Every structure is written in C-alpha cells, then in structure tokens.
Image (cartoon, grey):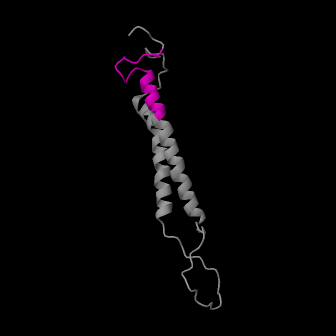
C-alpha cells in the first residue's frame, strides 16, 4: 500500500493503461459513430408509382424522416461515447480533488469555521 492507503496497482504501465482504458473506449465509440454517420445512405426504393398530377404548391413531408439502422446506431454510439467521457472526466476531477492534487490543500468543507 502507498502512503494514502491505496493498493499498489503494479507496474506504472499497467496503471497508465487502466487510467486510459475508459477514455480510449469512449473515443473509439465516438469515432465509430462518426464513421457510421459519414457513410453515404443508400437510396430506398419504394417501387413504381403511376404518374400523378403536379401539385399547385410544393409538397413538403410533415415530419417524415427516414433514418436507417446504421444512422441510428451511429447516433447512439456518439451519445454513449459522450456520456462515458463526461462521467470519466467528472470521476477523475473528483479523485484529484479528494486526493488533494487540485487546490494545493486549500480545499475545505463548508462546515469548517477555521478560516
């Protein structure tokens, strides 16, 4: 155990990999989501329709958006990757504050009246 009571995690390389595993996985999720969104979407074929008379005004679809499974998967991967990165950065910031690495030991509880 080290002086702070933490277990010795082994060689420095193992500790570094452990600290970087979560953000690397999150970045891989973000990259995979961006790749899925950047891929061209194939045209859907709805079959043959007879000729219809032209409308007097332009036809605008009302809230109808076709997104394929790959697009939804890309959006989900990006969202999950961002959530994991947000969790990880908050966790790391909290650990640094708790361990006294941020604030030079000047962090006090609100109930501390010795100021």
Total numbered labels: 0
Q: Is residue 84 left or right of residue 62?
A: left
Q: Residue 81: x and y, percent?
A: 50, 47
Give the residue at x 56% y 75%: 60
Q: Does 96 lie within the magenta span?
A: yes
Q: Nearer the viewer, residue 48 or 19?
A: 48
Q: Is residue 95 above or below residue 108?
A: below
Q: Residue 64: x and y, percent?
A: 61, 69
Boundaries of the magenta span: 90-110
Give the residue at x 43% y 30%: 93
Q: Nearer the viewer, residue 46 or 19?
A: 46
Q: Is residue 42 above or below residue 14?
A: below
Quarter of the picture containing the C terminus is: top left
Q: Residue 49: x and y, percent?
A: 65, 87
Q: Is residue 5 above or below residue 67?
A: above
Q: Nearer the viewer, residue 113 or 71?
A: 113
Give the residue at x 59% y 73%: 61
């Amino acid at each position: 155990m080290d002086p702070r009571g933490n277990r010795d995690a082994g060689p420095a390389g193992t500790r570094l990999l452990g600290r970087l595993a979560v953000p690397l996985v999150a970045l891989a999720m973000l990259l995979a989501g961006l790749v899925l969104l950047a891929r061209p979407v194939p045209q859907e074929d709805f079959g043959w329709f007879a000729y219809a008379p032209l409308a007097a005004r332009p036809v605008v679809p009302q809230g109808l958006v076709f997104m394929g499974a790959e697009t939804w998967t890309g959006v989900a991967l990006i969202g999950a990757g961002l959530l994991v990165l947000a969790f990880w950065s908050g966790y790391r910031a909290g650990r640094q504050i708790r361990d006294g690495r941020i604030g030079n030991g000047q962090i006090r509880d609100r109930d501390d009246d010795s100021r």
